[in-house]
Amino acid sequence: MSDNTFIHRDAFNLLCGDRIGYGMSRSVFSSRLLPDCVVKVEEDAGRFQNVVEWETWQRVQGTDFEKWFAPCRWISPNGCVLVMARTTPAVDFPEKMPVFLCDFKRTNYGLYDGRLVCHDYGTSLIFEHGMSKRMRKAEWWDA
């Protein structure tokens, strides 16, 4: 592996396009190489939201609950870079959502394969509530 910062910058710019979003610990970029994906970059150590999303996806993939989550495609060995399927903006938001989802900011959700999914679930409650079919009232809000 190279320690050359110029090569790392070139590789990053080859993979990542424009920054299309950001949150408390990550920036989200469009992908030049994978136009149907986004690249989430976590620069601050200790938050592990990319790792939480990856681990969550590993647990829900192939179950009835995967329909609520945007799929994760790849994660770097240290978890700082996550590639996730790209969603499109949603217009309609249901009154009830699964108890394991939270942070009902409309921009944290989008459409994937024609259904509403969460694409920012690094702080979900799935480890606390498990994969439950219980629903709760969603209090949607905008940034």
Image (cartoon, rainbow, N blue to C red):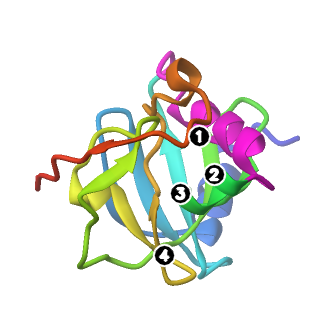
Image x and y of residue 52, in percent: 59, 31
Horizontally, is 111 left or right of 13 in the view? left
Query: Badge 4: few (under 14), some or many (20 or more) residues near its Cα, within 10 Å?
Result: few
- Could one spot residue 6 in this view of the protein? no
Write down the residue under mark 4: 115
Q: Specify the segment rendered in magenta.
A: 45-63
Write down the residue under mark 1: 53
Most frequent secondary structure within the magenta stretch: helix
Q: Residue at x 32, y 77 (%)?
A: 89
The reply to whether the C-beta atoms of the residues labelled 4 and 2 are less than 8 Å apart is no
Three-letter amino acid code at disc 1? Answer: Glu
Image x and y of residue 79, in percent: 67, 34
Q: Nearer the viewer, mark 1 or mark 4?
A: 4
Q: CA distance from mark 1 to mark 3?
A: 13 Å
Q: Residue at x 47, y 42 (%)?
A: 121
Secondary structure under tag 3 reads helix
Q: Residue furthest left?
A: 142
Write down the residue under mark 3: 68
Q: Nearer the viewer, mark 2 or mark 1?
A: 2
Three-letter amino acid code at disc 2? Answer: Phe
Q: Nearer the viewer, residue 66 or 78?
A: 66
**Residue 110 sits in which quadrant?**
bottom left
Image x and y of residue 16, in percent: 55, 66
Q: Is residue 40 above or below residue 102?
A: below
Question: Which tag, 1 or 3, sits closer to the chain's start?
Answer: 1
Q: Residue furthest front?
A: 134
Three-letter amino acid code at disc 4? Answer: Arg
Image x and y of residue 69, in percent: 56, 56
Three-letter amino acid code at disc 3? Answer: Trp
Q: Nearer the viewer, residue 9 or 49?
A: 49
Q: CA distance from mark 1 to mark 4?
A: 19 Å
The reply to whether the C-beta atoms of the residues labelled 2 and 3 are less than 8 Å apart is yes
